[in-house]
Image (cartoon, rainbow, N blue to C red):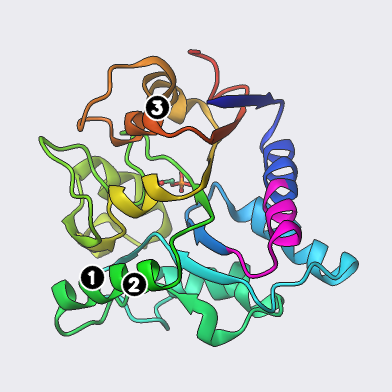
Amino acid sequence: MKIHVVNHYQDMSVKAAELVAEQVKDKNDSVLGLATGSTPEGMYSRLVKMHQEEDLDFSAIRTFNLDEYLGLGPDHPQSYHFYMHQHLFHHINILQKNINIPDGKAIDAETACRDYEESIVNEGGIDFQVLGIGGNGHIGFNEPDTSLSAVTHVVELTEKTVKDNSRFFDSEEEVPRKALTMGMGPILKAKKILLLASGEGKSEAIRATVSGKITTQVPATFLQLHPKVILILDKEAAKLI
Ligand code: PGA
């Protein structure tokens, strides 16, 4: 693991955007794995700026998002479809047909998961995966459990995740209890992985990710098995390593 510790959230965002831009320039039809949440917002805003001011070109880029809440359609302001369009896709020259996000409104969610997995394989797998991390060590919505699923699947969110994410909703009751998530397989098969973390609330999960025992109870510890992982952390997130 390559670890960069920077002073603040803003520095993390700038450095992360630089790495994504490098990938986009090196391979203009890269398959990017993308994350949502508050952590990558600054990175997306920087990438939008790079597109607007430096012509960073996304016209051949293909994307697969990590996850989506089950039950939320693309127009729901807390859906990850909505988030991605608001923070990135509306502002860059990516083609709609190259955007992939699990369908939260799928009538048959299990089949939708299988199709999603197949599309990732058909596109040749992920070149560059961006990850946030949950305070409980989840990546995507691969939650701590006695086992982890390799493939894209429907998952029950833990109480901690529901609580953590309730800040985006009017009340905790409104947070969906289930989600569709890319499994550990496509994430760990990505050619490069970039994990971002900011704030003290992530420090214990980061300690475990860097030096803890590999365990399904902290899914991010599996990143220790991957040969090309870069962590960009602010000082608070890095305080226990
Ligand atoms: P956050 O979420 O960026 O909103 O902290 C990260 C995650 O849960 O993966």
Question: Separation of disc 2 and disc 1 at Cα?
Answer: 7 Å
Amino acid type of the residue that numbered disc 2 sits on in the rendered structure: Pro
- Please tell me which of labels 3 and 1 falls first in the chain: 1
- In this rendering, does residue 191 appear at all? yes
Amino acid type of the residue that numbered disc 3 sits on in the rendered structure: Gln
**Please, what secondary structure does the residue beneath circle 1 have?**
helix
**Please, what secondary structure does the residue beneath circle 2 have?**
loop
Residue contact at pointers 2 and 1, CB within 8 angstroms: yes
- Residue behind mark 2: 102
Across and down, in percent, residue 239 comes to 54, 15
- The secondary structure that dominates the magenta segment is helix
* Front position among marks 3 and 2: 3
Along the line of sight, which residue is nearer the eye, 208 or 19?
A: 19
Across and down, in percent, residue 158 comes to 19, 45
Q: In the shown orientation, is residue 46 left or right of residue 119?
A: right
- Residue behind mark 3: 224
Determine whether 211 is above or below 74 in the image.
Answer: above
Amino acid type of the residue that numbered disc 1 sits on in the rendered structure: Cys
Q: In the shown orientation, is residue 167 left or right of residue 191?
A: left
How many dots with numbers? Answer: 3
Residue depicted at 70% across the width and 76% down the height: 91
Determine whether 235 is above or below 99 in the image.
Answer: above
